[in-house]
Image (cartoon, helix red, strand yellow):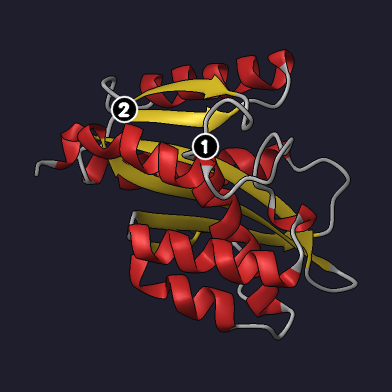
Amino acid sequence: MPLDSYRAFVDESSTVRSATRQEYLVGAALIPLESCDEIREHLRTLALPGQIKLHWTDESEPRRRTIVKRISELAPMTMVVTHLSERVKKNERCRRKCLEALYHEMVGMEVFDLLLEHRSDTQNKQDLGHLVALRSRGLDPRLRIDHQRGGDEPLLWIADILLGAINAAELGYPAHLEALQETIVVQRRTADSLRT
């Protein structure tokens, strides 16, 4: 199946790694358009009664194991781009660096349709402005982004769970990430990320 028949569902995470370092992570799940409805329904069955969306930090450890197992069985292609930096109060610059790298990876795979999790209207406009700026610098104009709330789009939950598993591995609990490792087709840092 050509990758241009895929859509990417993108989420982000930001976490402190040490007294002086923080890491911004952007994850994406690449889903064939023809499979979106089926996978969406599988994911909805994981939500508890009254639960708006799956969110790693809200789940108990037994629930995390169940969710990770189900996602690994669904076997989406996933990717993650990270940016390690000095600790800063505002991390929009880190987000832009990760998104730029992600966009170029997507173009290289001929995936042009990305859905990002909604943050705020102002932040969504900043994402769009950033994309326009990247296009003016040569990014393939076919790449497009949209935003949707996580509670309205279960396919965004996959990236949230992937990033949660990466963060858990950094804290010394690698089992979740090991279970998802075979889904990851790209895992890299931005070009100017700190290395340690």
Give the residue number, with chain letter if any, for mark 2: 138
For residue 112, what is the image quadrant? top left
Q: In the rendering, at what x and y percent does residue 54 appear?
A: 65, 46
Q: Write the residue at 49% across / 45% down.
A: 43
The amino acid beneath tag 2 is Gly
Position of 66 with respect to 139 (left or right) is right
For residue 143, what is the image quadrant? top left
Q: In the rendering, at what x and y percent does residue 90 appear?
A: 82, 40
Q: Write the residue at 70% across / 27% down.
A: 119
Q: Secondary structure at mark 2?
A: loop
**Marks 2/1: CA–CA distance:** 32 Å
Give the residue number, with chain letter if any, for mark 1: 154
Checking the image for residue 11, the label placed there is: none
Q: Judge depth for marks 2 and 1 and give the one in front.
A: 1
Position of 79 with respect to 53 (left or right) is left
Residue that lies at the very extreme toward the front in this rendered image: 49
On the question of residue 61 being in view, the answer is: yes
Q: Earlier in the sequence, mark 2 or mark 1?
A: 2
Q: Write the residue at 50% across / 56% down.
A: 81
Q: In the rendering, at what x and y percent does residue 153 appear?
A: 52, 30
On the question of residue 185 being in view, the answer is: no
Is disc 1 surrounded by few (<14), some (14 to 19) or many (20+) residues within 10 Å? Answer: many
Q: Secondary structure at mark 1?
A: loop
Position of 21 with respect to 142 (left or right) is right
Q: Write the residue at 60% across / 50% down.
A: 160
The amino acid beneath tag 1 is Pro
Position of 172 relative to 143 (above/below): below
